[in-house]
Amino acid sequence: MTAAHRRAAVLGHPIAHSLSPVLHRAAYAALGLDTWRYGAVDVTEEQLPTFLAGLDASWAGLSLTMPLKQTVVPLLDHVEPLAQVVGAVNTVLVHGSGPGRMLTGANTDVYGLVAAIGEAGVSGGVRSAGVVGAGATAASTLAALAQLGCTSPRVYVRSQARAGGLLRAAHRMGVEPRLCRLDDAAGEIGRLDVVVSTLPAHAADPLAAAVVADAVVADITGVLLDVCYDPRPTALAAAWASRGGRVVGGERMLLHQAAEQVRLMTGAPAPLAAMAAALDDALAPAVS
């Protein structure tokens, strides 16, 4: 590691809400990387090619959020195998500059999901699982569940016609999901070992109410990871916990995927405790 100034940033549209700067800056401080800077840049899909073309040797890497995780793939020089099969890149590593510069795409969302679920004591042997939603995060979730042992999870969607991209990703990774109606989720997910909700804020609130009212499953014993973390806890997480289930907050996935990005960009082990403390401080005002 040289003493030269290095840069990294999170890109997306919108981007003001991102907590990536909190996590990465905390990591740089703990690692003593005083010359490293991490920012947030509002970049649309249309602006992305120009932004990437302007990267110079000071850039170490990029974090990507929606809507850029799939748009970026054809703009890269190399895409790591996991990101290729998932069809989503949330990390870009910048190597060199000028004509010899190379942009490599990676996916740390899968790592973040596996690590977060692992905090609930699940490290493998998952026999049954459910995914709520069918977006880009759902594809990473399928890969994570496959690593944990479940290659035929249920996927609960509002419209099966809009799940084509997810099914293509599943085929590439050798996973055979079973598409189910979102309306059926409440009566089924309580029986599963692991459930991951990938829906945006408040979109799962009706499901939360149905989970509380479900009289079929007396007690929930499985693990829920709700990737949404605002509010904290979400209505679905609170409902799950009220029925006895184990809950992992979405901020833990955010933490672990960022920690892996720090490792990839800096070459140093991520200071997880320092990053977690900074994240908790940032989220504290939202806790009531």
Image (cartoon, grey):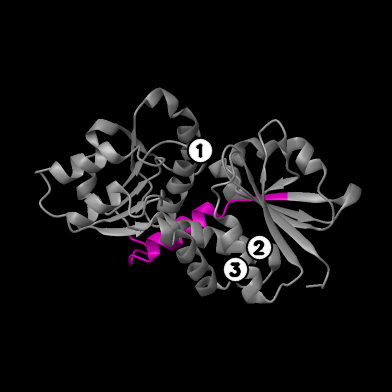
Indicate the amino acid at tag 2. Leu
Q: What residue type is labelled 1?
A: Ala
Dot 2 or dot 3, earlier in sequence: 3
Residue at the spot of label 1:
169
Quadrant position of the N terminus in the picture: bottom right
Q: Magenta segment, which residues?
A: 104-125
Give left or right: position of 38 versus 172: right
Report the amino acid beneath label 3: Ala
Q: In x, y percent, where is residue 241? A: 23, 57
Mark 3 lies on residue: 26
Answer yes or no: do the residues labelled 2 and 1 have beta carbons within 8 Å?
no
Which of the two discs, 3 and 1, sits closer to the camera?
A: 3
Tell me the quarter of the picture where residue 48 sits: top right
Position of the C terminus by quadrant? bottom left
Q: Provide residue 148's location: percent of width, then percent of height.
A: 39, 57
Q: Mark 2 points at which residue?
A: 264
Instruction: Classify mark 2: residues with Cα within 10 Å, few (<14), some (14-19) or many (20+).
Output: some
Q: Do the residues labelled 3 and 1 touch (CB within 8 Å)?
A: no
